[in-house]
Amino acid sequence: MAQIDEDEDGGRLRSFRGTADVVLSVFCFLIAVGHIYVAFDPVLSELQRNSFHFAGFAALAAILYPMWRGARGKAAPIALDLIIGIAVAASAVWLTFAENAIYDRGVKLATADWIAVIICILGAIELTRRVAGNIIPILIILSLTYVAFWGKYVGGVFAFPGLSVETVAFRSIFGDDAMFGTIARISSTYVFLFIIFGAFLLRSGAGEFVINIARAVAGKMVGGPGIVAVIASGLTGTISGSAVANTASTGVITIPLMKRAGFQPKFAGGVEAAASTGGQLMPPIMGAGAFVMASFTQIPYETIVAVAALPALLYFLSVAFFVRIEARRNNLPPMPDEGQTLGSAFKEGGASFLIPIATLITLLVVGFTPTYAAVFGIFAVIVSSWLTKNPMGPKAVFEAFVMGTKGMVLTAVLLCAVGLIVNVIATAGIGNTFSLMIASWAGGNILIALVLIALASLVLGMGLPVTAAYIVLATLSAPALSGMISDQFVIAQLASGALPETAKAVLMFGVPEQIDMLSRELTHAEAAGLIQSLPLEIAAPLRDLVVPPAVATSALLSAHMIIFWLSQDSNVTPPVALAAFTAAAIAKAPAMATGVASWKLAKGLYIVPVLFAYTPFLSGDWPAMIQVFFFAVFGVYALSAGLQGCMERPFGIVMRLACFAAGLACLWPATLLLNLFGLVTVVALLVWNVRFGARVAVQPGQ
């Protein structure tokens, strides 16, 4: 009898879970369809759309990320999570409809409004803790209490007189940068629709096509399995906004391939993590970063993804160079021929990938908004799937919507909650203060500023997902960095004698003791020293007077792209390297050793941003951008060879130093002759290495 009772209880539990999964899937489907409908017919105001967006994903987060993980499946914890989710969702919806009444009362909160605001903020803190850890909740609490209570007790530049609790509560919900403000708008439109687009591509079989095309292109090369991982992760990055998801989806195939080919497990995991991190740099999705960047800078999304393509390609080439060099260093053979060809890959699944991507890019080029382009791209996936062996019927469409919605939960909750921090930064002027500090510490030197921002990014990345780290860091440091990049134009004008007389007059106010310098021709170093010594109250108006709008916009884009690239390092940099740790689990390798390997392979994350700051890699016309890219390819290859001690064959310390020098010469900005010299040197070193290099293979593990 006891056994029968247990079987009945187990059957009831399975039946309950099955019903709950169906209800949850239907709820996810309704959320996705609702967002698509609003994208075409904006029946809701922006505030209403953003609040409903948060409400739906807050309810999902409460269910999918239980408060006590060990209590999964037990009635009481499930009921509590359900109550929390419903309470937070209901509070968000209430505040939307209470907005007009609050304004009618002179921005005074009624008792019900207070309850809703408190539940909303506490819910955002708790749900963010569940999906992303403790750091963001702590930052939210510190931020809100700073402007309400303890800011007035802080001395120095961070002192803040304080706001009333009611004002803080109101601005936290209804402010332009608050929970239902700008960042929530990005989440509820561009980001979610592109996440759904990516889910449809994956469900249609595009992921399998990506692996097949990578095998066909690189399978027979030296280090083929590793290069397959690089290509597959790059192509997957065009449809996936998560480095961890990229690692998990492609790594289960590529990491075993690399291990069978002879790569060490930690290196195989490192290759996949580094390549998957690059997926967030690859247009058109670029995680959520491209959309946030477009909103922050007011630069069109299509402009951002267009200029991001060559840098992303350079990053993937840098990882591929490491893979080939490692294969040569350990004398690893190519993969056996598995019969995969480009023709067969395209025949089996090319339509499901190429037609939707081409549709998306075409719509963006002709002027459609990213929202419309994403929706039409989703329809293109469904239609094109019928040209493949995986036609999408109603069930597949339903599953794609559900998969996309579940994949959006972390991002949606995170972006809405981060609005609480960004709102405080904007309200208290902390961003300007932090920018002033960076400018002061760097002394106008862009390279020092890059190091400071990279360190700050690494610290933030230990507790924040990359999108949140980018948002916080861009809010704090982008103004200072873009100002320093703009100053390069002012310095060039001053050194060439083209500075207008009105600008010279402003300059005299800043450095009256150097007035005699303005009457003679200056070297570039002298002009740089003069501009970098200016106080901010002189440097800013001088910059506004001299720098053309197009140059200022390019400087702003470069600054944000630098910060966006540097914020990716938390995926591959120990002690917190989520993509690397995911790869380590698949490779069955030590987590920290895999993290170190991935950090070494992802050196492009630090090299390419320097090019953004000092060259026209983002801001020039296409010939100038291609020229930078061309020399950078040789420079990155030489630096990779120097780090690994091998080109086609291993070499010693002297050759390593020569590779480093040649690589730096290729990358050095604004010196074409030096770039040419570096390129010739790299080619000469490679030829010498092939003809006369040692033919001794390094044993694995060395």
Image (spheres, grey):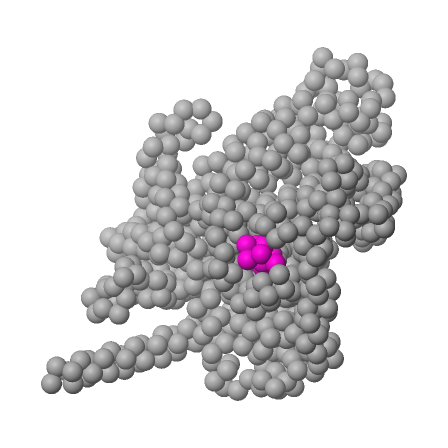
The x and y percentages for residue 413 are 42, 58
Q: Residue at x 33, y 66 (%)?
A: 63
Q: Which residues are magenta?
A: 263-272
Q: Identify which residue is drawn at 53% across, 67% down.
A: 252
| Magenta segment, prevailing SS (helix, strand or loop) | helix
Q: Quadrant of the N terminus?
A: bottom left
Q: Quadrant of residue 380?
A: bottom right
> Residue at coordinates 20% horizontally, 66% vertically from top-left?
76
Residue 395 appears anywhere in the view: yes
Horizontal side of 63 relative to 179 (left or right) equals left
Q: Nearer the viewer, residue 163 or 154?
A: 154
Q: Horizontal placement of 384 versus 433: left or right?
A: right
Position of residue 268 measured from the top left corner of the image (x, y, whole percent): 58, 58
138 or 696, nearer to the observer: 696
Identify which residue, 363 or 427, lies in the foreground: 363
**Horizontal and vertical percent position of residue 547:** 74, 37
Q: Is residue 483 magenta?
A: no
- Residue 124 is at least partly visible in this image: no
